[in-house]
Image: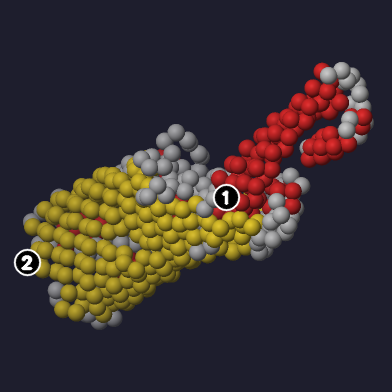
């Protein structure tokens, strides 16, 4: 059997949790939730979305506190014929009850200093109570594998569980400068600290072999697969030893004066029965053999029995309980530049460029529980791509603001396979994200808003799988803002993301085609308080 539980668990939980690219979160404020587009922000959340726009706040000190509660459901449906249940559905729940965004800024004259803290990647925990197809298939494949060896087996079972958490925290600082009333620029840097944690198991792997040759316990009832393979190894090693011994006996008889051409049937009945049984176990008939041929054949099948016993021993080890307790951690730096241009009072245009974040994660295994997946001290490449963000805010009338946003993530220049030595072509084009939002002031204090955003992924089928997948999305959000006092502003929003189904075809162990379908849905609520201590 193949080594079990050989999945790359990190891909389950380290992608973007809602808005953003493959691994980058951009849903970084309550204002974003209710508008879906904040790239041209000139409010305090501009510390993330538009650092050069912070100068538009005017002189003073500004603070924004935000939190989002996010729930995501990931579903994989497999039509693999050997899985118990057709089609078989696997559901993973990702939860992030706390998804903070904290921003501060201080402006004086032409200069601004701003900072932010947020989960720039990951940000949640994933629970897969029944695993995924790639986990279970390595157990399910025991049945057809044994059937090919003429060992009748019709059922399997196993206890499968996986839980992981991931968060990439971003600590960002920016310095801005207002060149004139129309143009501002800013430069910043973000420290990204990444931590992934994994706990899981694959245990109690059982099958129902009807093969009493390996022992009286194997007559069709459910038994631990490791016990069956261990018994099989013992039985086959015994056959190898017996074959070698029987061959030696026949060779000795020839040396004692019998001709090699002497029919095997001329030997004592017990010898004939033993040789016949041993050759029969190898699928060879002893009928009509002479003792020379029988001896040579026994010598030939003995190493076959030994090799089969070795395979059984490996299978026994491969079906032992697997437990995982591991973590990955590392940090990287993201340089950021931005510019804000306001050609008129009712039009604001912003551009932000984030450079590629080189991020290497070091693996740490707890209590020697690597499970055959994680090796203590190994390095995982988890780079975040460079991105370009463009935003436009336009006020056709005083009470209405239209917000346009566009992001592109330079995935083609990023290695997503996690390995320094293996290169897998997984990206056809760069990831795109764009949308439209609008806000209307009902009163001087109350504003309502709504927005839409769309993502267009650029991955190919090499990227897609039950452990991670990316499909096009449409997200809608809405909410309101309320000015509690001239110094305090409240924002509340909600968002739902619709994901297009994805699919991929595979070949099972018998070269029969089957399909996996990938589905995802995400919803969230957000609340934020903005504080203004202007001069």
Disc 2 vs disc 1: Cβ atoms closer than 8 Å? Answer: no
The numbered disc on residue 411 is none
Q: Is residue 437 left or right of residue 298?
A: left
Give the mark toward the camera: 2 or 1.
Answer: 1
Residue with the mark numbered 1? 319
Give me the residue at 24% from left, 48% from top.
191
Residue at the image position 53 percent from the left and 59 percent from the top: 160
Work out which quarter of the rendered image holds the C terminus and state it: bottom left
In space, the residues marked 2 and 1 are separated at their CA atoms by 69 Å
Q: In what quadrant of the picture does the N terminus appear?
A: top right
Is residue 520 in view from this perspective? no
Residue closest to the eye, 152 or 284: 284
- Label 2 Cα crowd, 10 Å radius (few <14 / some 14-19 / many 20+): few
* Residue 500 vs residue 317, the one in the foreground: 317
On screen, 530 above or below 115? below
Q: Residue at x 37, y 61 (%)?
A: 124
| Residue 57 picture quarter | bottom left
Is 79 left or right of 90, judged from the image as shown?
right
What kind of element bears circle 2?
Answer: loop
């Amino acid at each position: 059997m193949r080594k079990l539980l050989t999945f790359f668990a990190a891909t389950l939980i380290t992608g973007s949790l809602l808005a953003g690219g493959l691994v980058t979160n951009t849903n970084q404020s309550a204002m974003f939730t209710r508008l879906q587009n904040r790239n041209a922000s000139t409010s305090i959340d501009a510390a993330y979305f538009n650092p050069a726009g912070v100068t538009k706040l005017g002189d003073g000190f500004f603070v924004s506190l935000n939190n989002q509660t996010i729930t995501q459901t990931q579903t994989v449906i497999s039509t693999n014929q050997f899985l118990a249940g057709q089609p078989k559905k696997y559901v993973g729940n990702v939860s992030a009850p706390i998804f903070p965004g904290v921003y501060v800024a201080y402006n004086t004259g032409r200069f601004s200093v701003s900072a932010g803290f947020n989960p720039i990647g990951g940000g949640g925990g994933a629970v897969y109570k029944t695993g995924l197809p790639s986990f279970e298939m390595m157990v399910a494949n025991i049945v057809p594998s044994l059937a090919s060896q003429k060992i009748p087996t019709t059922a399997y079972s196993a206890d499968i569980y996986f839980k992981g958490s991931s968060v990439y925290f971003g600590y960002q600082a920016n310095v801005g400068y207002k060149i004139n009333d129309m143009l501002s620029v800013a430069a910043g840097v973000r420290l990204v600290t990444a931590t992934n944690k994994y706990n899981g198991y694959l245990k109690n792997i059982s099958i129902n072999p009807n093969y009493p040759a390996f022992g009286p316990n194997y007559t069709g009832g459910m038994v631990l697969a490791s016990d069956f393979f261990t018994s099989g190894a013992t039985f086959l090693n015994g056959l190898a030893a017996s074959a070698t011994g029987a061959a030696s006996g026949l060779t000795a008889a020839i040396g004692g004066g019998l001709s090699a051409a002497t029919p095997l049937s001329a030997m004592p009945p017990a010898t004939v029965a033993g040789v016949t049984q041993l050759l029969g176990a190898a699928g060879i008939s002893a009928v009509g053999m002479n003792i020379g041929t029988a001896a040579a054949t026994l010598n030939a099948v003995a190493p076959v029995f030994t090799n089969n016993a070795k395979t059984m021993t490996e299978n026994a080890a491969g079906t032992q309980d697997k437990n995982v307790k591991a973590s990955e951690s590392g940090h990287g730096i993201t340089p950021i530049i931005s510019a804000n241009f306001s050609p008129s009072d009712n039009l604001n245009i912003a551009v932000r460029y984030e450079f590629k974040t080189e991020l290497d994660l070091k693996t740490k295994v707890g209590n020697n529980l690597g499970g055959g997946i994680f090796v203590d001290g190994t390095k995982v490449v988890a780079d975040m791509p460079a991105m370009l963000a463009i935003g436009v805010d336009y006020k056709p009338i005083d009470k209405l603001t239209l917000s346009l946003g566009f992001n592109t993530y330079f995935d083609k220049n990023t290695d997503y396979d996690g390995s320094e030595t293996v290169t897998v072509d997984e990206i056809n084009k760069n990831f795109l994200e764009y949308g439209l939002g609008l806000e209307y002031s009902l009163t001087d204090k109350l504003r309502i808003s709504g927005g839409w955003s769309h993502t267009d992924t650029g991955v190919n089928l090499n990227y897609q799988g039950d452990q991670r997948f990316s499909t096009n999305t449409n997200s809608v959000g809405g909410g309101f803002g309320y000015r509690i006092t001239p110094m305090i502003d409240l924002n509340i929003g909600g968002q739902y993301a619709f994901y297009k189904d994805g699919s991929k075809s595979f070949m099972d162990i018998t070269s029969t085609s089957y399909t996996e379908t990938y589905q995802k849905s995400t919803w969230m609520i957000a609340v934020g308080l903005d504080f203004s201590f202007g001069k």
